[in-house]
Amino acid sequence: MSGVFLLYAIAFFMSAFSTAKVSVYTVGEFAWDSAFAEMDRLLFFGKDAWRFFDWLYQYPAFMMLLNLFYNVWLFAVLGVFAFFCFQLPSRVRSTYLYSWLACWVALGVVCATLFSSAGPAFFSRVHPGLAVEPYQDLMERLRSIDAYLIASDYPFPLWALSMQDWLYNLHVEQGVKAGAGISAMPSMHVSMAVLMALGLTHVQKWIGIIFWFYAFIIYIGSFLLAWHYAVDGIVSFILTLLVWYIVGLFVNDPKRVSPYQ
C-alpha cells in the first residue's frame, strides 16, 4: 500500500515540478548559456564538446540508437522508482527515494533557476541577433542525419529535433504541460541515470554496472543531441553523488531513522 501511495504522490509531484521548471526562464532569463559554452571549450581543448566527438556523427545508426536510449530514459526512471517503492523497507530504499526527491528539487528547480540556461539546441532561439550562431553547425548536422534516417527507412528518426521544437513552441506560448520547460544546467537526465546506477549497485552489482554504462550513454547523448553542454552532465554527476552521500548520512543516523527502517 505504501508503494501504491508513493506512485500516486509522485504524479502530483512531477506535475508541480513541470510548473516550477517553466518558471526558470522568468527568473534567470537564460543568462548562463555563454558561460557554459565557454566552459565546454576549456574542458575540450578549445573545441565544443560535440566537435570533440565529431566522428560519431558519421554513423547514423549509432545516433539513432543514442536517441532511442535517451528517450527510454523516462521509462527507466519511473520503472526503477517503482521498483524501490515496492521493496521492503531498508536503508537503500529510503536513501534512493529521498535522494530521488532531493535531486528533482535541488538540481531540477533550485540549481536550474540559479544557473538558468537553455542549451545548444535553443541557443540561437533564446539569444537572437547574434553575429555568429555557435551551434548552427551542430543543428545542421543533426537535421542531416535525421533526413538520412527517414529517407533510408530506418526504424526511428532523431526524435530529439521534434521534441526540441515542441518545447520551444511551448516556451513561446508559455504553456504548462508535463515535460515542458527549457533548462540545461544541470542535466536531470544525467542526474537520474547516475542515481539509478547508485541505487541498483547496492541491490545487485552486475545490474549496477549496466546502469553505470547507461549513465555514460546518457551523458554522451546529452551534448551530441544538442540538449546540454558537456559541463551540465559533469555538474549533475557531482551533485547527485553529493545528494546521495548527504541523504545516506541522514538515513543512517540512528537518532533520526525509524527502528522499522
Image: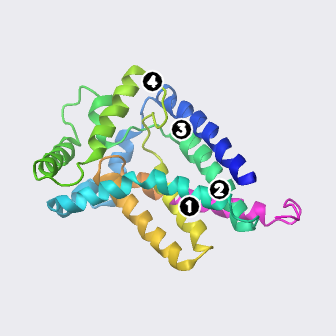
Circle nearer the viewer, 4 or 2 = 4
Dot placed on the residue nearer the N-terminal end, 2 or 1: 2
For mark 3, give the secondary structure. helix
3D distance between C-alphas at marks 1 and 4: 29 Å
Task: Tell me the mark number nearer the camera, choosing from 3 and 1.
Answer: 1
Residue 21, above or below 150:
above
Picture layout, residue 1 above or below residue 12? below
Overall secondary structure of the magenta section: helix
Q: Are marks 2 and 1 in contact (CB under 8 Å)?
A: yes
- Quadrant in which residue 166 is drawn: top left
Q: Position of residue 95 (x, y in %)?
A: 69, 61
Q: Residue at x 51, y 74 (%)?
A: 207
Q: Which residue is mark 2?
A: 99
Image position, residue 259 (x, y; %): 88, 65
| CB within 8 Å, label 4 to label 2 | no
Q: Is residue 243 magenta?
A: yes
Q: Residues within 10 Å of mark 2 (few under 14, many from 20)?
A: many
**Residue behind mark 3:** 114
**Label 2 is placed on what type of residue?**
Ser
Q: In this picture, which residue range is highlighted in magenta?
A: 237-261
Which one is closest to the eye, mark 4 or mark 3?
4
Q: Quadrant of residue 219?
A: bottom left
Distance from label 2 to label 1 (Cα)?
8 Å
Residue 115 as seen in the image, left or right of residue 149 = right
Q: Residues within 10 Å of mark 3 (few under 14, many from 20)?
A: some
Residue under label 4, please give it.
175
